[in-house]
Image (cartoon, rainbow, N blue to C red):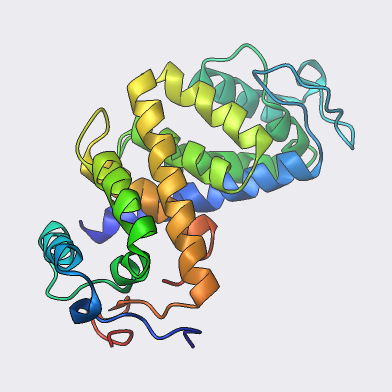
Amino acid sequence: MDDQIWYEVAYVAGTTHAVNSVADGLRLPLEFSPSARMAALPLIDGGAAGPEVKGVFDEIMEFYAVDHVPAVYRWMARDPGFLQGYWTAVKAAFSDRKLDRLTKEILAFAASMTGKSDYGVDFHLREARRLGMSEAMLTEAVEVVQLFNTVTKIADALQLVPDFDPRAGAPGGGRP
Amino acid sequence: MEIVRVTQPEELAPEDQRFCEATKAWFKIDFVPKMSRVLLTVPEFGRPYGRASRRAMADGALTRAQKELIATMVSAINVCEY
């Protein structure tokens, strides 16, 4: 695979993990499932937002085909400039490029499961399904998540040195 | 540093050595990954795990490439150096 794909995977990993951290850390209510969670801090109301924020909110709702602004972006709207920049980056990370948008949402779902993010699992499961993830695809994705959570923990428990030197891109350092 | 001595391929049972050869072909590499040897060190664990893994990682509703990307994502979120 060419480097562009790995960059795209990394951008999805980074933004998903960060957004999930904020959403779960601030106890934001889940977007699509019943949730008893109450936001730990007040969020910007869509109706009360200024024009700069409102433009971003409209874009977010269109991108995700939702009729409400996800709570995590309502949080970010406390700083309109930050919201505008971060959202534009997220949109770029999740748009069709070398990897298609559905694959990226499945990756975000996998990242959310692995990171034990209630907010992320709820959000990306719905979004992946909306973009066409079938039940068979879901089953297979969860199986891979389970398999690789198994082997990564085994590797960590035994402190295995990698088989590959990632910088060389060839078998190296960790080989016996 | 590894806290165990990782089993060498030739120490594994013949049927597990055959599985290791298949693993090399699957990944198009010329050595047996440590993880394969670690899993097969206890065959009662490694053999059924390997069956589940081969089944789950083959092309299906998701492509093998998509599954490898998911695996990368799990490793990244878990910050697993291996």
Callout count = 0
Quadrant including the N terminus of chain A: bottom left
A138 on left or right of A115: left
Q: Residue at x 18, y 80 (%)?
A: B10
Residue situated in front as seen by the camera: A16 or A67: A16
Residue A133 can be seen in this image: no
Query: Which residue in the rendered view is the most extreme toward the top?
Result: A67
Query: Which residue in the rendered view is the most extreme toward the right?
Result: A41
Residue A32: quadrant of the picture? top right
Residue B15: quadrant of the picture? bottom left
The relative height of residue A2 versus residue A143 in the rendered view (above or below) is below
A161 on left or right of A82: left
Residue B77 in percent (x, y) is at 53, 56
Q: Residue at x 41, y 71 (%)?
A: B82
Residue situated in front as seen by the camera: B32 or B15: B15
The relative height of residue A127 versus residue A160 in the rendered view (above or below) is above
Residue A39 can be seen in this image: yes
Residue A91 in percent (x, y) is at 48, 37
Residue A86 in percent (x, y) is at 60, 45
Quadrant including the C terminus of chain A: bottom left
Residue B21: quadrant of the picture? bottom left
Q: Residue at x 40, y 27 (%)?
A: A138
Q: Residue at x 33, y 23 (%)?
A: A136
Residue A135 in percent (x, y) is at 38, 19
A136 on left or right of A112: left
